[in-house]
Image (cartoon, helix red, strand yellow):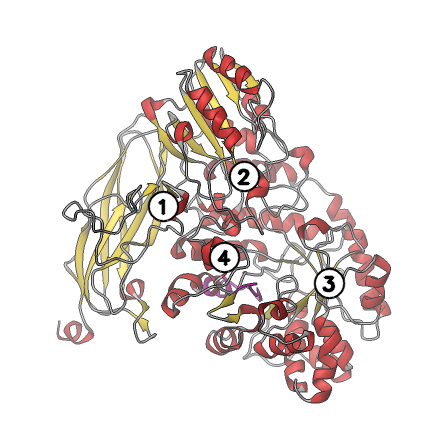
Amino acid sequence: MPNAAKPADPRVESLLARMTVEEKVGQLGVFADMVRPFAPDVNPENNVRNAGEVLEQVRAGRVGSLFNGVGAAQGREIQRVAVEESRLGIPVILAADVIHGMRTVFPIPLGEAASFEPELAYRTARATAIEATAAGIHWTYAPAVDIARDQRWGRGAEGAGEDTFLGCAFAAARVRGFQGADLRAADSLLATPKHFVGYGAVAAGMEYNYVEIAEGTLRDVHLPPFKAALDAGALAVMTAFNDINGVPASANHALLTGLLREQWGFPGVVVSDYTADMELVAHGYAADDRDATLRAFSAGMDMSMQSGFYAAHLPALVESGQVPMAALDAAVRRVLELKAAVGLFDDPYRSLDPARESDVSQLPAHEALARDAARRSIVLLRNEADVLPLRGGQRIAAIGPFVRDRDNIEGCWTLFGDKTRYVTLEEGLRAGLPAGSTLEVVDGCGLEAPLEGGIEAAVAAARAADVVLLAVGEPQRYSGEAQSRTRIVIPPAQQALAEAVAATGTPVVVLLRNGRALALEGAVRDAAAILVTWFLGSQTGHAVADVVYGGYSPSARLPVSFPHDSGQQPFFYNHPRTGRPETPEMSEFKARWREHPNTALYPFGHGLGYARIEYGPTAVSAPVLDWDGTLEVRATVRNAGTRAVEEVVQLYLHDRVGSRVRPVRELKGFRKLELQPGESREVVFALSRAQLAFTRADVSHGAEPGAFDVWIAPSSVAGAPARFELLPPQDAARG
């Protein structure tokens, strides 16, 4: 693994000494892999070459990496040309956007974060790496670790939600899962935390928009998941499209060099997002293509993706002295060391074995994992009169455009999924149908438009049923890159269907399919039960059936706050306190909207299971926490129901007075417990000064003495706090 402190790799230094400037620059180029089957619809066309041109560039030593092609046999041919026909025999590294599954598709990352089980993310990333490397891929542009506090932004589907603590846990787990224990292993997939940085804070939730952000917010909210990913072993970082306070992230020297390399000591490679260097001109930050190249490279961006700018302009910039040869060598050295770290110099044909690609023996285990991951991602928001789980002998009407649908199962950024193995909702519901029950399926409407006679057929089915399963939500293309929304609601045709079905009086269970938090309205909001089923991947139908029929008690919790209304965005639970908070003592002059309170419809951390869980009071082991001491926070949690369930116990903290206004609550820990009927468990969390630290008014990082509230609770708004005081260092010393 590259490390700034380790001795230089003699193979790398030997290559550097023999390389021409053009060959050095070639190592910094990332281009579309047109030799293998490619996914051209996921990026705009720019600088596109045919297969012959790509191979000729590889042969000339002008390509460091190719991306989004797949296939071991053709990948082996690309590598053969690189190592046997190029002058220096430097292998290429083959990359792809493999986000939440390869052939087997797992829940979108936002949905998986709802599990509150980082270990689950580790296992799905590991399975993804096994399948991706078998298909001839060394490097993935994942995980996305952006914190998304505005649900209008479509790429929140790719991350872990609105909370930094949860985001850090999942970022680290996914990196470890992708990469495995040994980067040189045939099934190790190099990870790339993205998008560095602040992408989730784009103004108005509009994709690619500008970011105006306070230094403290950047440091406390958006940077920590990247640090967690790098500490977990990631050796590549991808830059963001947005600017930050006027400086584009892809040419931001203070962040790419000052913070990432000098402060954090990052030894790895910084790669641009797709044509991000080219876009410096459109930003108005660079005068022309050459200037954009100079600014991006000088800021610390090692590899340029698809624009071709580095190949076109870096040699002349080096010749003119505007880019020192030492700087070029440093970037090339990082790329070559990355290739050495993943074993390509020792075995250029690593992960390019057609026999391994054809081996499907792993698929049953991966399908079982996909089913378990999917059901662990489903959040039960509401369950009036215990309508769920369904009982045997019921007449069930499954209504809605997602019941039979196979095209909106996988979610955004799934390029290589095996659609022949996808399980639709109808297939899963029929396969698991309880004895004596019947199932009638009616579409009712399309994803965005009415169907002739659709509502009439749906109403008839609902009237003849004991319960309706109403499968509504967002089409898959509504979330992901370039899919910002102004109103985060379900399409009008589906809402009209919901209103008509609800008017029959038959109990309705909403099966919500979505890639973000939604503002639920009318009959959807008021349904007897609501399950958030996200985009769950290959095993969607079986996983939903497991939960609906009671084979699995839902255990997931919301990683994002569901608002009352779209106009509340950006909305997140851990907002700073205000001088006029919404309290019963204050009249209209308080922090709220005319139409809605300053609350969520369903808050971060909320979720139900099939049993009632009781929380005892939160208690602390002492009223004070010494500066270098540890404090225990405990509460008793009891299953008061008749079924075994899993409960996500959450630890929240509030700093009552700070040099910067502090959030009303912050997640500081969580634990998932399995509780048998009637079982009580005492849950204990340890707190130290490190968990109380934040970016202070003087931009230093640390804790401040004073009073704190602490909760052990089932959500970000539940429970009553205990209180303790952090003593200053001198008091701790006297004690």
Q: Residues within 10 Å of mark 3 (few under 14, many from 20)?
A: many
Q: Secondary structure at mark 3?
A: strand
Q: Is residue 718 above or below residue 248?
A: above
- CB contact under 8 Å: marks 1 and 4: no
Q: Which mark is residue 145?
A: 4
Mark number displayed over residue 604: 1
Check residue 31 in the rendering and tell me which mark sits there, or answer none.
3
| Residue 545 point in image, percent of width and height | 50, 26
Residues at discs 3 and 1 in contact (Cβ within 8 Å) = no
| CA gap, disc 3 and disc 4 | 24 Å
Q: Amino acid at mark 4?
A: Val
Q: CA distance from mark 2 to mark 1?
A: 19 Å
Disc 1 element: loop
> Percent position (x, y) of residue 384?
33, 25
Disc with the residue nearer the chain's start (3 vs 2)? 3
Quick check: is 241 in the magenta stretch?
yes
Q: Tell me which segment is drawn in magenta.
A: 227-242
N-term mark: 2 or 4: 4
Q: Secondary structure at mark 2?
A: loop
Question: Does residue 620 show up?
Answer: no
| Image location (x, y in percent) of residue 671 | 35, 47
Q: Please state which amino acid type lies under the numbered disc 1.
A: Phe
Residue 535's mark?
A: 2
For badge 2, the amino acid type reads Phe
Label 4: which secondary element: loop
